[in-house]
Image (tube, rainbow, N blue to C red):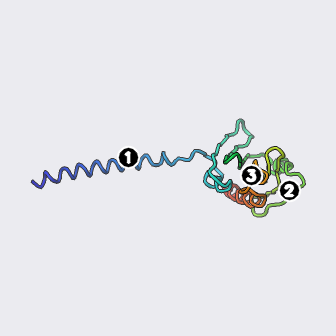
Amino acid sequence: MESNLADPCSAFRSIFCIAIAGCLSAAPALAHAANNCAWINETTASGLLGGDSIGVLTEPAAPGQPTICTFTQDQAGIKRTLRITVEIAADPQSRLAAVAQSCGTDAAPLKAIGNEATVCTADDRKSGPAERVVGRVRDQVFTITLSTSLKSDPILTREALKTRIYTAAEQVAGNLF
């Protein structure tokens, strides 16, 4: 009689274990991130942009062109963007000098970021306030731009742009080392 009662429990236990194993094996597929940016993830980018963002990775179309990660957050008609480009340069110092020209005379050295880095205002009359960091880690030249489409953005104020672009630069440069 005892063996008859043990069989249903044993069968139930086996089914339960199989169900749990099936759920656990599917979990990694559900948790897979949509963006494969090597320098910053969507969660960090979302924090810098002030809300949930969507990331897109653009691989180089040809050798010598940059890899681009773009994170965008659209909220109530305001578009906030974090754009990161990284390229491997044969002569990184001259490439950095060429890319840094986009900052003009507004460029200021950014200490403790990569081998060399500068920060500048990158405002665009059409798209709104922005900050840019241009830097280098070994033979990799990177550019980070943080922007908003709203001139008086309550989240990405001028001060917040400066603070958050520095945080983004720390993250990117750290991951390039």
- Distance CA(mark 2)–CA(mark 3): 15 Å
Q: Which residue is mark 3?
A: 146
Residue shown at the point (64%, 56%) measured from the top left: 47
Q: Nearer the viewer, mark 2 or mark 3?
A: 3
Image height check: is 159 above or below 61?
Answer: below
Give the mark nearer the N terminus: 1 vs 3: 1
> Horizontally, is 7 left or right of 111 in the view?
left
Give the mark nearer the N terminus: 2 vs 3: 2
Q: Which residue is mark 1?
A: 22
In terms of secondary structure, where does tag 3 sit?
Answer: strand
Residue 141 seen in the current view: no
Res. 77 mark: none
> Horizontally, is 103 left or right of 42 in the view?
right
Residue shown at the point (43%, 46%) measured from the top left: 26
| Mark 2 and mark 3 residues within 8 Å of each other at the beta carbon | no
Observer-nearest of 126 and 63: 126
Q: Amino acid at mark 1?
A: Gly
Observer-nearest of 14 and 61: 14
State the residue lying farthest toward the front: 76
Res. 107 mark: 2
In terms of secondary structure, where does tag 2 sit?
Answer: loop
State the residue lying farthest toward the right: 105
